[in-house]
Image (spheres, rainbow, N blue to C red):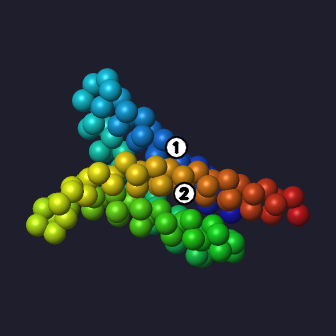
Amino acid sequence: MRVYYAAVVFFNLCLTAQVLTVGLAYFYNPTWWNLHVWLVRGYSGVSLLLLGGAWYLPLPQRVKALATGLPILLGLQFLTIHLQMPSLVPVPLAVLHPLIGFSLFSVSTTLVHRTRHVVWLQSAT
């Protein structure tokens, strides 16, 4: 269970670094964008491991739901930045990218807190 919690924290730290690098790329130096892209390509697979672990381990439904949301939100992030449908949608889908990113950060942080409670309750018994 502690290994799962460590993976959840690792994912959250990677996501935090990704948000930081996009800020650095936008407000400071565009070369930071390369690291931003590299980070998401590097750690997005961890979301699938977290999903599998959440359903394999005896975790509460809330933790399972949060872990399920991670790859879904990452997939939506990918679609909003890469999918262009000007004939169907007059506004670029990319406008949703930051909103989904904030949702992803919220879900990830909540998953850290929920998993921590489970791990500490388990180790106390």
Q: Amino acid at mark 1?
A: Leu
Where does the image place residue 11, in percent across and percent down from the top left?
A: 51, 51
Q: Please, what secondary structure does the residue beneath circle 2 have?
A: helix
Q: Are marks 2 and 1 in contact (CB under 8 Å)?
A: no
Residue 63 vertical position relative to residue 94 in the rendered view, above or below: below
Q: Quadrant of the C terminus?
A: bottom right
Q: Position of residue 65 (x, y in %)?
A: 57, 71
Percent position of residue 63, x then y: 63, 67
Q: Left or right: 107 with respect to 27?
A: right
Badge 2 amino acid: Val
* Residue drawn where x is 26% and y is 38% of the image: 34
Q: Residue at x 35, y 37 (%)?
A: 22
Is residue 7 in sight in this rendering?
no
Q: Residues within 10 Å of mark 2 (few under 14, many from 20)?
A: many
Q: Is residue 119 above or below residue 40?
A: below
Question: Tag on residue 67?
Answer: none
Residue 13 numbered tag: 1
Where residue 20 sits in the image (x, y, percent)?
42, 35
Left/right of residue 63 with respect to residue 23 in the rendered view = right
Check disc 2 and report the residue beneath it: 107
In what quadrant of the picture does the N terminus appear? bottom right
Give me the residue at 80% from left, 63% from top. 122
Element class at badge 1: helix
> Residue extending furthest front?
90
Residue found at x 40% / y 41%: 18
Taking the view exactly as shown, the residue that stands out farthest to the top is 28
Please say whether residue 28 is visible from this viewpoint: yes
Q: Give the mark nearer the N terminus: 2 vs 1.
A: 1
